[in-house]
Amino acid sequence: MKRIPQDTILRLSSYLMALFNISGEMHEISSYRLAKILGINPNQLRKDLSYFGKFGRRGVGYKVEDLIYSLKKILGLDKIWNVALCGLGNLGRALCSYKGFSEQGFLIKVIFENDPKKIGRKFNNIEVLDYKHIEGKIQKYNIQIAVLAVPVGQAQELAEKIYNSGIRFILNFVPLNINLPSDCLIRNVYMSSELTCLSYFLARR
């Protein structure tokens, strides 16, 4: 299988979002114009797409709906993925309430918590279960992806439980490097680190 750079995959997602935004206004778009909307070089756009085949027509560009369909298929967004959310604090509640996940096929099917006041209840009509039951419930809900939004002190142990239950894809919002075997793909979202990066450049304006 051809190895695709991770940066290319991330850019495909931004291409798709841009196409969604213009789909009601345009039926066709050139690589130059799409790249300009995205603020990137047209050659980069064409190179990224070339990993997956030929798209569009020279001198005409891409049919917007056709390219949306192709990108969704490439990114696996033509399928439904079941998600387990771990942690129902402020961040967890915000993630659970975000409609963008379900619109793209990511369905939060179950929430795991260790707070007795939350366990056994429902949030947005989703069951809140005890961390202790992760291994059994992962199979019941046919979970493919886990999202970590728990305190730092709980993250490693919980990630190991998730891994032992068979999950190999984790989105981690905890500011901690999770250590799991190499067959597990972990995507880290460190919001404080992103703000620190912005503050660095802001301080030098």
Image (cartoon, rainbow, N blue to C red):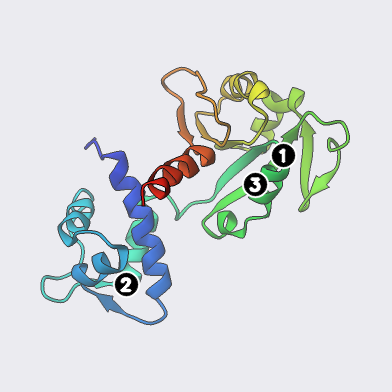
Per the model, the C-alpha gap separating discs 3 and 1 is 8 Å
Element at badge 2? Answer: helix
- The reply, left or right, for residue 30 in relation to residue 190 is left
Residue toward you, 89 or 106: 89
The residue identified by callout 2 is 64
Q: Secondary structure at mark 3?
A: strand
Q: Quadrant of the N terminus?
A: top left
Write down the residue under mark 1. Answer: 111
Quick check: 113 above or below 39? above
**In the drawing, does residue 177 fall left or right of residue 151?**
left
* Residue denoted by label 3: 108
| In the depicted structure, whether residue 38 falls above or below residue 83 | below
Q: Is 109 left, or right, of 201 in this rendering?
A: right
Crowdedness near tag 2: few (<14), some (14–19) or many (≥20) residues, C-alpha within 10 Å: many
* Disc on the earlier residue, 2 or 1: 2
Point out residue 152 in the picture as x, y percentages from the top left corner: 63, 26
Q: Position of residue 123 (x, y in %)?
A: 78, 48
Q: Which mark is residue 120?
A: none
Q: Outermost residue toward the right?
A: 117
Q: Amino acid at mark 2?
A: Val
